[in-house]
Image (cartoon, helix red, strand yellow):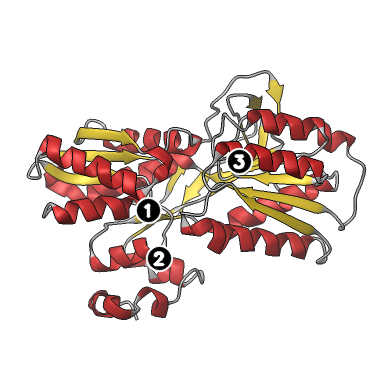
Amino acid sequence: MRRAAVAVAAGAMAVSLAACGSAAESGGKSESTESAAKKGDDIKVGLLLPENQTARYEKFDKPLIEKKVKELTNNKAEVIYANAKQDASLQNQQVDTMVTNKVDVLILDAVDAKAIAGSVKKAKEAGIPVVAYDRLAEGPIDAYTSFDNVTVGKTQGEALLEALGDKAKKGQIVMMNGSSTDPNAAKFKEGAHAALDGKVKVGREYDTKEWKPENANANMEGAISALGKDKIVGVYSANDGMAGGIITALKAAGIKVPVTGQDAEIAGVQRIVTGEQFMSVYKPYAPEAAAAAEMAVALAQGKSLDSVAKDTVDSPTTKGVPSVLVPVVSLTQENISDTVVKDGVYTVEEICAGKYKAACDKIGLK
């Protein structure tokens, strides 16, 4: 299996890619790629994203993928889009529709990595290659792009320990993991535990249904009730949306402790500015979207992925999937300008609008 070191921009850390499955299917050579007739730029690309509650999918992923596909095909490709709105059954139906519409390739961000496997197989049997986007879907996928998700969790855990300092041994933390149906959530959890275990006591830990902020809020209220507000010294939150729900519960109880996040959503960045949230994980969406588009176009045109995908990973069902893994950055007050502002994700005016201006001025964000 090809391996590559994945650099984490927040520090000089490198990690080796870990294989996570042992099934017999091989993703290294795609049957549909080998058998596909050579096609030109006039292709149909199906794009299936999982939900629209997290801001990133509609604001960043969709337009970035569409733009890159157009660039790669001289503006001749058609991108057919559907959002599953966190409904795994609906997403299965959407794959069936894409198969019926005879798309040339699918870019798929699965709501439920296991539940989608049958639909991935249907697409494969119809000669449609599938690029798993952001989440490692099960079934005979042909390619995959995401971030090194264990490293994401480690980055969050290490940041929380940094924020806690000596307080790490003086109380307990609450761990608010993501949805149990999302394979990325398990990887975030694995990485976080690798950083936190033995260094801080976990008082309560939750897998949060559907990643919903309101569910994280209810879980946090339960943790506060069970542990007592004076015992909680910090919260590991797997993403920014949940961090918002958690912070609402903490505020209601009169608790101010470090809280982590992920996705660098505008609300999360603004909470970092005010000090309500300690950090987020900034995952540059442009290179992830570009990798998905490049692999999808190549597969649709019957070309090799060797020049695009330098790594491979294993899913529970497929070995040796050609992959592109993108580095991540720990986002704090200190590097907002050098990350999301510099990359054009947000302007200072957007971040510092209205009630956030004074906080921005205080930390020198202008």
Measuring from the top left, give residue 16's x and y in whole percent. Answer: 51, 36
Separation of marks 2 and 3 at Cα, in angstroms: 28 Å
Q: Quick one: 232 or 253, which is closer to the camera?
A: 253
Packing grade of label 3 (10 A; few <14, some 14-19, many >=20) is some
Mark 3 / mark 1, whichever is N-terminal:
3
Q: Is residue 71 visible?
A: yes
Separation of marks 3 and 1 at Cα, in angstroms: 23 Å
Q: Are the residues at dot 2 and dot 3 in contact (C-beta closer than 8 Å)?
A: no
Label 1 residue SS: helix
User: Label 3 amino acid?
Assistant: Leu
Residue at the (35%, 79%) spot, across then down: 353
Residue 118, placed above or below residue 241: above
User: Label 1 amino acid?
Assistant: Gly
Name the image quarter holding the C terminus: bottom left
Separation of marks 2 and 1 at Cα, in angstroms: 10 Å
Residue named by callout 1: 241
Residue named by callout 3: 90
Residue named by callout 2: 266
Q: Quick one: 40 or 56, which is closer to the camera?
A: 56
What count of labels does the image hold? Answer: 3
